Amino acid sequence: MKKLYLEFIRGAAALTVVTYHFLELHTLSSHSKHFYFGNWGTDAVIIFFILSGIVINMSQNSNPKEAKAFMGNRILRIYPQLVAGLLLGLLVLYVTNSAIPPAGVIAGNFLMLSAVKDYMINIVPSLQSNSPIWSLSYEIVFYLLFALTIGKFQKRAIGWWFILSLAIMPLYYLQTGPAVVKHFVAVISFSSIWLTGYYIYQYRSYFYADKYTALFSVAVLPLISRMHLSTLYYDPAKYLLFAVFAVPFFSYCLQGERSGRKIRWYSLLLPYAVVEYIVFKQPYLTFTSFMAYSLLPVILVTACFIIQKFQVQQHIRRFIFNTGKVSGKYSYSIYVIHYPVLFFCASFFHNTAITLIVSFSGVALFAYCLENYLQPAIVNYFRKSKETYSLVTLKVAFKGLSFYDRKLGMVKKVVVPLATAISTLFLFPFNSN
């Protein structure tokens, strides 16, 4: 049940990213009025970071792996589909007569060292036709750091990692040093969000929240993401606050039997009021948008009350579980493949209905193929290679043992009976009564 809640959230986040990029690319290609759906794509990526921290901790707890096995599984899970997404992105650049980046930039994308051009400090910019893969450059470092903590002192190591992520954050805002340093400072700073997800699962039994508190907390997240604590678009401090405010929501999704301290909904009122005041004083949102985001907690809590009043919560829960089974499974494939498809459709189609049908159908088809054909084929290939290697190793070992058949026969015929006789003589007094 817990996993299906998380799968639904993962699937919803992936679809949010697709919707945001569809609207962004289509409005740019049709020269229509700029779409004010800003930040939703980034919000979904932050949700992915939190979810990743939760799921990795959950997986490692249920099936512990050594560092090498952990990294092997992570790379095998994310890299084959990433390569497919990058290759499709390059093909789309060629077909649309867009500029092909230099070989060094292409190599940097395949090595997972990219970040969004003009918005983030990067070693190499992400491909224009698949810019969302910047988040995977961050994720792979999170996985590597986590793998390095695996061992007897993991709890302490992760604690120091979290402290480092907070301590290094001021350097992110100073933006000093070469691009390589600034890139990894950014990655470490954003790892605090991933670690918040890790700690949500780690200490899930210390606190719990009811559905009203959970909905209230998640409804405040869009307002937090529209705060401007600095001039930088990607702000780790703001999104760390985002992650902390999401704690009651994810706590509710994870909880089994209620235990620990209850998070009361009214405890969120004061920080919510502070966030609302900060956003209101900033000139970035229209008054209509501000009111919509401000009233979202009230709307969601009221909707929950109505659902409970009419006793249809079982239908909602069934919908969440059934949808989560499908959308969660394909969420990663959708994420890595959707942008090249949308980029291609935005270049060739200018009718909204046609673009919508073709692009979403294309994303669904590619995601289905990646998840059901490419990924299993790659996994089976490496699994068979591993089994073949193990079989060859055993054959070599048995062949090597044949050289010692005579000596083994001697051990069996002479040494073992002699050792048995000596043991019997020594133990005889203790067996006598």
Image (tube, rainbow, N blue to C red):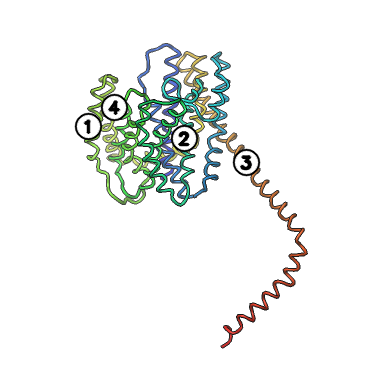
User: Residues under labels 3 and 1: Cα distance?
Assistant: 53 Å
Which residue sits furthest bottom? 433
Q: Amino acid at mark 2?
A: Glu
Q: Nearer the viewer, residue 28 or 11?
A: 28
Nearer to us of marks 3 and 2 is 2
Classify the position of the N terminus by image quarter: top left
User: Residues under labels 1 and 2: Cα distance?
Assistant: 33 Å
Nearer to us of marks 4 and 1 is 1
Using the image, determine if residue 97 lies above or below residue 374.
above
Left or right placement of residue 1 versus residue 270 in this view: right
Q: Amino acid at mark 4?
A: Tyr
Mark 4 in CB contact with mark 3 (< 8 angstroms): no
Mark positioned earlier in the residue sequence (3 or 2): 2
Q: Position of residue 148 (x, y in %)?
A: 48, 43
Mark 3 packing: few (<14 Cα in 10 Å), some, or many (20+)?
few
Dot 4: element = helix
> Can you see residue 312?
no
Nearer to us of marks 4 and 2 is 2
What residue would you read off at disc 3?
382
Dot 1: element = helix
Residue 273 is labelled as 1
> Can you see residue 112?
yes
Res. 400 image quadrant = bottom right
Mark 1 packing: few (<14 Cα in 10 Å), some, or many (20+)?
few
User: Residues under labels 4 and 3: Cα distance?
Assistant: 48 Å
What residue would you read off at disc 2?
139
What residue would you read off at disc 4?
293
Mark positioned earlier in the residue sequence (3 or 1): 1
